[in-house]
Image: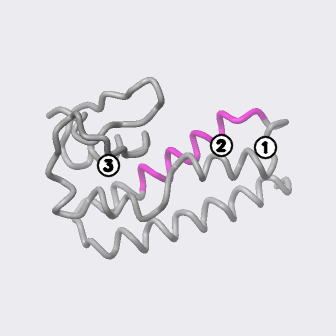
Amino acid sequence: MTSQGKTWDRLKAEYLRRVEKTLSSVKHPRSRDVLDDVRSHLDRRFAELDPAQRNYKNLQAIITEMGPASDYAELLAPQRRRHTNAKSSAKIPLVACPVYRCLGHRSCHISDDNILPTGACHT
């Protein structure tokens, strides 16, 4: 395994531990599904990265794109499952779509800036 591969494994494992810890705080029945989706998304993003581009900066950028680990727990918390008006200025990271699908929503509408406005998912 290359040093970039080892660095990626470490960054990914740290992020997944933080996500798992925050998900355990909400005790949602789909927490494992969300964690698996996050892991799959991370693996897909790493695989899409050209091997020549697998430096620390780009690996960290993948983690940063995922947003704070605490966001996943907030998305599953009961008070957050209620959708607000689609005109809300609150933003949820693009990777929240797997969370919404786990909660039974069929689709997510993504804006041009790769951010999902709160309430933009439709059942």
Q: Pick the quarter of the image with the C terminus.
A: top left
Q: Is residue 54 left or right of residue 22?
A: right
Of mark 3 and mark 1, the one earlier in the sequence is 1
Secondary structure of residue under mark 3: helix
Looking at this view, is 1 or 119 the one in front? Answer: 119
* Amino acid identity at mark 3: Val
For residue 82, which numbered disc appears in the image?
Answer: none
Q: Is residue 58 left or right of residue 119?
A: right
Q: Is residue 34 above or below residue 13?
A: above
Q: Is residue 70 left or right of residue 89?
A: right
- Residue 63 lies within the magenta run: no
Residue highlighted by disc 3: 99
Is label 3 in contact with label 1 (beta carbons under 8 Å)?
Answer: no
Q: Nearer the viewer, mark 2 or mark 3?
A: 3
Looking at this view, is 106 or 114 the one in front? Answer: 114
Residue highlighted by disc 1: 54
Residue drawn at the location 71% of the way across and 56% of the way down: 8
- Secondary structure predominantly adopted by residues drawn in magenta: helix
Is label 2 in contact with label 1 (beta carbons under 8 Å)?
Answer: yes
Secondary structure of residue under mark 2: helix
Residue highlighted by disc 2: 46
Task: Locate residue 106, reporting x and y percent.
Answer: 21, 33
Label 1 CA crowd tier, 10 Å (few <14, some 14–19, many 20+): some
User: In the picture, residue 26 is in which quadrant?
Assistant: bottom left
* Amino acid identity at mark 1: Arg
Q: CA distance from mark 3 to mark 1?
A: 27 Å
Magenta-drawn segment: 36-50
User: In the picture, residue 24 is in which quadrant?
Assistant: bottom left
User: In the picture, residue 34 is in which quadrant?
Assistant: bottom left
Secondary structure of residue under mark 1: loop
Q: CA distance from mark 2 to mark 3?
A: 20 Å
* Amino acid identity at mark 2: Phe
